[in-house]
Each structure stands twice: as C-alpha cells, then as structure tokens.
Image (tube, rainbow, N blue to C red):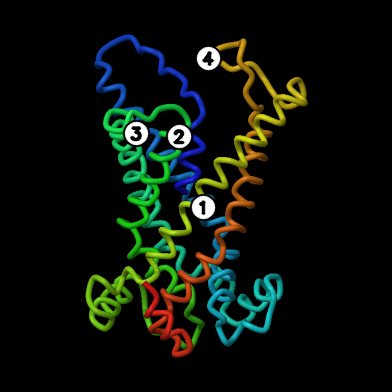
Amino acid sequence: MAAAAALAAAEPTTAMPQAAGAGGPAARRDFYWLRSFLAGGIAGCCAKTTVAPLDRVKVLLQAHNHHYKHLGVFSTLRAVPQKEGYLGLYKGNGAMMIRIFPYGAIQFMAFEHYKTLITTKLGVSGHVHRLMAGSMAGMTAVICTYPLDMVRVRLAFQVKGEHTYTGIIHAFKTIYAKEGGFLGFYRGLMPTILGMAPYAGVSFFTFGTLKSVGLSHAPTLLGRPSSDNPNVLVLKTHINLLCGGVAGAIAQTISYPFDVTRRRMQLGTVLPEFEKCLLIT
C-alpha cells in the first residue's frame, strides 16, 4: 500500500475549486479530508472483502496448513467451503475491516507530514520526494496497525474444529498473555518493512516506465489531455488502472519471499515446525 500511495502522489494533483458561501479554506480542506478518508475506507473494505477468499487461501498455503498444503489454489478454494462452509473463506476478514480505516488515516496524515519534512529539511522535490514520503507513510501505517494484521493471520489460519481463538478480542488477549506481551504482536515486522522498499521502488519504476512508453508510442490510443493543462497528456483511466495493476503484480512477485517469511514468523508459535522462524530478526 505504500507503493500505491507513492504512485498516486507522483501524479499531478487537481486543484480544489473554491466553493462559495460560508466556511474558509481550512473548513473545506477538513471536509475534503474526511470525505476522501471515508470514501477510501469504504472502497478498501469492499475491495478487501472481494478478494478475502483468495487472501485466506494464500495464508493457508504459505504456512502449509496440514489440511490444505497438498492442494493448489483452485483446489483449496473448493475444499474450504466443503470443510468449513462458505463463510470459512472469510475468516480473518473482520480484523482486516477494522484495520483499513486507521491504516488509511495514519498513511494519509503521515504522507503529508513526511512530504513537508523531506522538502524542507532535505531539499528533495519532484517524484523522488513523493516516493520517499509514500514509502515512509506506508511503513508508519504498517507499524501502527500491525497487531491487527497479526490477529487476522492467526484467525485466517484456523480450521473449523481446531480453533485456538474464538474471535478478535480473544486472539488479542491470548497473544498478549502467552507470547511476551505487546512485542508478541510484532512477530514478522522486520521482513514486512524490508519487503516494502523493493515493492515501492519496483512498483513506482514499472508504472513510470509503462506510462512513458505508452504515451510515447501510442499517445492517441492510450492518452488524453490533462484536466489541469490540455497541452499535457495523461493516461486514460482504464489504461492507468491496467498499468497500476501490472506494476503491482510485478512488484508483488519480486517482494513475495518477504511476505512468505512474514507469515511463517507470525505463525511461529502456532506451528511447531516454524518455531525456528521466531529467531529471525
């Protein structure tokens, strides 16, 4: 998500029109922030719920759940409803929904703070400072909301009939009591942070390259005049989405080993064969 913030930040922002009537610029800015926060949070909830079955399958296969480790992705998608019912595909999704709003708020506020800090203190501007600010904001949001990700993974890895946790609150209490207090919620944080740097860099670079090549070789087919400056070409909306998806897929593939390492560490106390993963720092 840090890369997404960086990519979005790298695009020229459209100036907000001055609304007539009561309320100064600060009031309008606050309302715009609230509207963007709510819209982004609701959109994030819808998107995460849509892909929740695939996300649970990923957790089950990454950590070699003994019920499904011999299966592939599509076989697991069929096997989970047979064993646990269709709601079994959405285990852990509640914790993800709770995480989305604070994650978005922290990322949004941190991005603006880091962008100003980098510009004023380091004198860096342009795409580089947006990439740096987006990556740092993503890392900040991940660190602050990581306990919810830990709980989500623990709940998603459970199989019907073998529950260690009865829900989100019970998972929080159990992890805190049995796994070293607050630090128990941060197992696997290091590979998460290490994986965000290549993810953000590769995603940003790939998106920029695809955009430049597309507008250079097929400006009429792929581009449209910018709403800010008709003399500047930008990608059409569906092409922009396609380029972002391709860039994200490539970046995710390159940083995927860090994601597997994180999952193994998060589940290190649940599965005896992964206890050695707890020693990774």
> Does dot 1 land on a helix, a strand or a loop?
helix
Tag 2 near tag 4, CB within 8 Å: no
Q: Earlier in the sequence, mark 2 or mark 1?
A: 2
Quarter of the image for residue 69 reads bottom right
Give the numbered dot on residue 198: 1
Alpha carbons under labels 4 and 1: distance apart: 32 Å
Position of the C terminus, as image quadrant, is: bottom left
Among the two numbered marks 4 and 1 on one chain, the one whose residue lies closer to the N terminus: 1
Q: CA distance from mark 4 to mark 3?
A: 22 Å
What amino acid does circle 4 point to?
Asp
Q: Which residue lies at the image location 45% right of the left edge and 38% below the top edge?
A: 131
Kindly identify which residue carries mark 2.
Answer: 128
Q: Quadrant of residue 234?
A: top right
Q: Secondary structure at mark 4?
A: loop
Density class for disc 3 (Cα within 10 Å; few <14, some 14-19, many ≥20) is: many
Mark sitting earlier along the chain (4/3): 3
Q: Which residue is mark 4?
A: 228
Name the residue type under label 2.
Val
